[in-house]
Amino acid sequence: MWGPAGGRAIMAPVTLVCLEIGKKRVFASALQWPGWSRSGRSEHDALESLASYLGRYREVLQGARLPAPDVDDFVVTERLPGDMTTDFGAPGAISSAEREPLAAGDRVRLGRIVAACWSYFDQVAAASGPQLRKGPRGGGRDRDPMVDHVLAAEAAYARKVGVRHPKPSYDDPAAVAVLRADVLAALTAPPPDPEPSWPLPYLARRVAWHVMDHAWEMQDRSLPG
């Protein structure tokens, strides 16, 4: 199910989605497409939001010359119970599909998509001013604190697969590159024995979701000029 490189389904004629259902929020995540995850107050709202971001997600992959989804006909394959993480605003449940073994080509494909999300995030950050428009309730991070927050999360996520680095500073591109390279190495290599606490497809989905969620927020909150 993971895509063209792994020797299973070449490309699903529909987009396979898992739903993570909390008390206040539902996340919809396209399982073959890390980074394409959106939330809403109900299953319907989450799926509508996911569909509305298809064009924006395609732009991320097309910019990296990667095949992109061209359908928004969703098939829900799993409904996962959410928790406090879900309601706080992050997809925290691992689907059974993400626990399946991955072929080498599948791992490479996931790594390329995550790298495309990083590249897009960096482009958005470079094009944004240091100050961003306030969010709906008058809050929200400005650009540099947002980038710093994304890097802190990535360093924490990386530890779930045995990659241990201190959080790189947002203004230290060499340290950022080292962290990302080691995360990609973990994604594209066979899983160690014993397997890490996060399966590799979930790591890809969680990292890419967080990167894209903040890249799109930065775009939406950028001040004119």
Image (cartoon, helix red, strand yellow):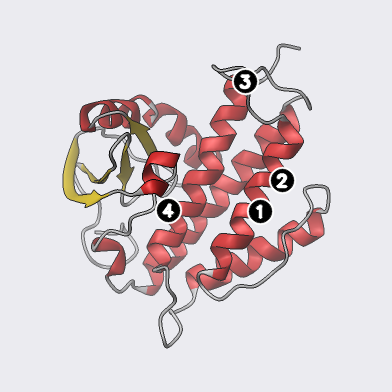
Sooner in the amino-acid sequence: mark 4 or mark 1: 1
Q: CA distance from mark 1 to mark 2?
A: 6 Å
Disc 2, SS? helix
Question: To which residue does mark 2 refer?
Answer: 148
- Residue at 33 percent across and 35 percent down: it is 25
180 relative position to 169: left or right: left
Q: Nearer the viewer, residue 152 or 208?
A: 152
Q: Residue at x 32, y 52 (%)?
A: 32
Indicate the secondary structure of the residue bearing disc 3: helix
Residue 148, image quadrant: top right
Q: Is tag 3's residue or tag 2's residue first in the polypeptide sequence?
A: 2
Q: Position of residue 3 (x, y in %)?
A: 31, 57
The answer to whether the residue labelled 1 contacts the one labelled 2, judged by CB atoms less than 8 Å apart, is: yes
Q: Disc 4 or disc 2, which is closer to the eye?
A: 2
Q: Dot 1: what SS?
A: helix
Residue type, label 4: Arg
Label 1 or label 3, whichever comes before in sequence order? 1
Crowding near the residue tagged with mark 2, few <14, some 14–19, many ≥20 C-alpha atoms within 10 Å: some
Give the number of the disc on residue 221.
3
